[in-house]
Image: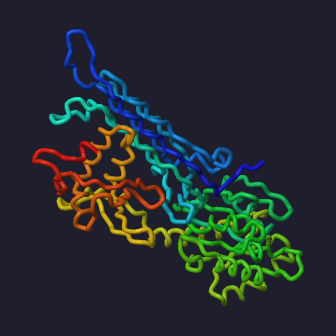
Amino acid sequence: MTTFVDRVVLHVAAGDGGHGCVSVMREKFKPLGGPDGGNGGHGGDVRLVVDPNVTSLLEFHHGPHRRAGNGRPGEGSNRTGANGESIVLRVPPGTSVQDTRGNVLADLVAAGMEYVVARGGHGGLGNAALASTRRKAPGFALLGEPGDSLDVVLELKSVADVALVGFPSAGKSSLIAAMSAARPKIADYPFTTLVPNLGVVTAGETVFTVADVPGLIPGASQGKGLGLEFLRHVERCYVLVHVLDCATLDPGRDPISDLDAIEHELAQYGGTEGDLADRPRLVALNKVDVPEARELADLVTPLLRERGCTVVEVSAVAHEGLKSLGFAMAELVRAARAANPVEEAPRVVISPKAVDEVGFTVTREEDEDGVRFRVRGERPQRWVRQTDFSNDEAVGYLADRLARLGVEDRLLELGATAGATVLVGPEDNAVVFDWEPTIAAGSPLTGPRGSDDRLYR
């Protein structure tokens, strides 16, 4: 049974906003009570929160579809609908949030970090909120705005200071068990470790975390073995430690060839956290408690040092050389932490919008079907989504809002005429209508003064 998952595709949907209510007060002795329709409630959000007690994405592997609650519609007597319930999804530290194209949306590495992955829709205004001196008793209300709905990819990259890399059965799990309180599975067959294990090591005054990455083999960066699935856990580590098996009985293998093979796979792997070739290295020649392994270690140590490698001979079984290895790791970790200090929380800067910012764009598009005009902008698109097009009064209210915003003036500047095709929104989800300019936008009057023939069409 699967107990560790480090990559899932999550389908999230925020809650829709509740519709506004159309209501008129009707009480005894109050013949002119006026509109009292309440606003709709806002839809719930979908939030990701880092929880250090969570170690895997297994929960989302079994339940990849998550939806927040919808807002309740408004009611009469100025009663506002209840907001939809937001859902909080707890993820482990080191979770990267990406869209389906691979673009990183958020990097959640510290406990308590939060990211709103899907935002709930706004509730629609009731007719009480829409009343004004010009429109004393609106016969319409605004619809609730739909919430965000999207697919995101969650990838877990272990947050550790040191990564132990090497061939299967090189003794990485035995080392992390001997140097920390971690108790990974240990056996005498390849690929015993199927999930990354984390252990906390103390060397003097330095405390750091060590990750035991499942065994790599030649071709791991192209998908062979388990390497491609777990190489991402090496990306965030400051230090890489090559654990080389000096007692291997496999023909054609020796510490030098193992080191070259693993270095080749690390160089071929293209991560998102920078080139792995720049990370400081250590070489741990393991299993020197075996006499033949000690002889081989003494033979290859000068060759490795000629390459500039820091070499430590260790034995996880006899606990030999572990203290030296721990202090060598700690020295490199201290240097890496000094070179990469933890950034302080960014200061929140509130920048007001410019007074001349219109908040929308109108573009002229021409193709074989003719000329059309596309309106884009947060407010026009939201207003269209909240309009009930089966209500003529609501459609007129939308036209008034667009005219006050300046959309119709911009359409006239671009050469739009009555009956022109106007699209509001992006190409994949636009509202199309034939434009009829208002008097305020410069529509010519074809009848006597004070009349408009459009009222009789």
The x, y position of residue 222, in whole percent, is 72, 74
In screen coordinates, is 123 left or right of 315? left
Is residue 111 shown left or right of residue 53?
A: left
Could you say where residue 361 lies in the image, as x and y percent from the top left? 30, 63
Nearest the viewer among 157 and 305 is 157
Q: Is residue 144 left or right of residue 355?
A: right
Snapshot quadrant of residue 209: bottom right
Colour mapping used in the image? rainbow
Query: Across the whole image, how many numbered discs are drawn on residues?
Result: 0
Q: Position of residue 316 (x, y in %)?
A: 75, 64
Q: Position of residue 90 (x, y in %)?
A: 55, 45
Picture quarter containing residue 308? Answer: bottom right
326 sits to left or right of 186: left
Q: Is residue 201 visible?
A: yes
Q: Which sits in the foreground, 157 or 129?
A: 129
Q: Furthest residue to the front?
A: 447
Front-lying residue, 137 or 143: 137
Seen from this angle, which residue lies furthest top?
28
Q: Residue at x 22, y 57 (%)?
A: 406
Instruction: Tell me what residue is drawn at x 52 percent, y 46 percent.
Output: 13
Is residue 284 something one can see in this rendering? no
Residue at the left extreme, as displayed: 449
Q: Is residue 191 above or below residue 52?
A: below
Question: For the point 88% across and 76% down, which residue is it?
Answer: 250
On-image quarter of the C terminus: top left
Determine which quarter of the picture holds residue 304. bottom right
399 lies above or below 26: below
